[in-house]
Image (cartoon, rainbow, N blue to C red):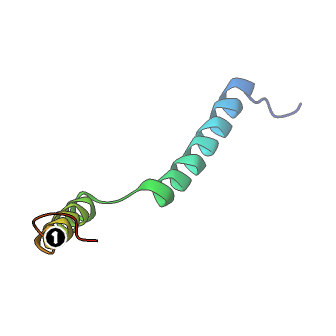
Amino acid sequence: MGHVINLNRVRKQEQRKEAAKQAEINRARFGRTKSERKTDELRKAHDEKLLDQHLIDGGDAS
């Protein structure tokens, strides 16, 4: 007699494999650590501050 398999179990295993594969793709595309996000936020704030310091006050600059 042959080997008996549970089709529901096989289907769920395939779904888990597909979900894991998609999660890996999403981590590569969107994943950044908290420290990386904080560093980017601080850099952006610093750059905006430096840019604001170079604005010419009083009227149109053109």
Q: Residue at x 25, y 65 (%)?
A: 40
The quadrant of the rendering that contains the N terminus is top right
Q: Which residue is mark 1?
A: 55
How far from the left and from the top, in percent, is residue 53? 11, 72
Q: Residue at x 16, y 70 (%)?
A: 55
Relative horizontal placement of residue 44, taking residue 27 as reference (left or right): left
How far from the left and from the top, in percent, is residue 34? 24, 57
Q: Quadrant of residue 48?
A: bottom left
Q: Nearer the viewer, residue 50 or 2?
A: 50
- Helix, strand or loop at label 1? It is loop
Q: Nearer the viewer, residue 48 or 22?
A: 48
Q: Nearer the viewer, residue 11 or 58?
A: 58
Q: Nearer the viewer, residue 15 or 56?
A: 56
Relative horizontal placement of residue 56, taking residue 3 as reference (left or right): left
In this rendering, is residue 25 above or below 9?
below
In this rendering, is residue 62 above or below 32?
below
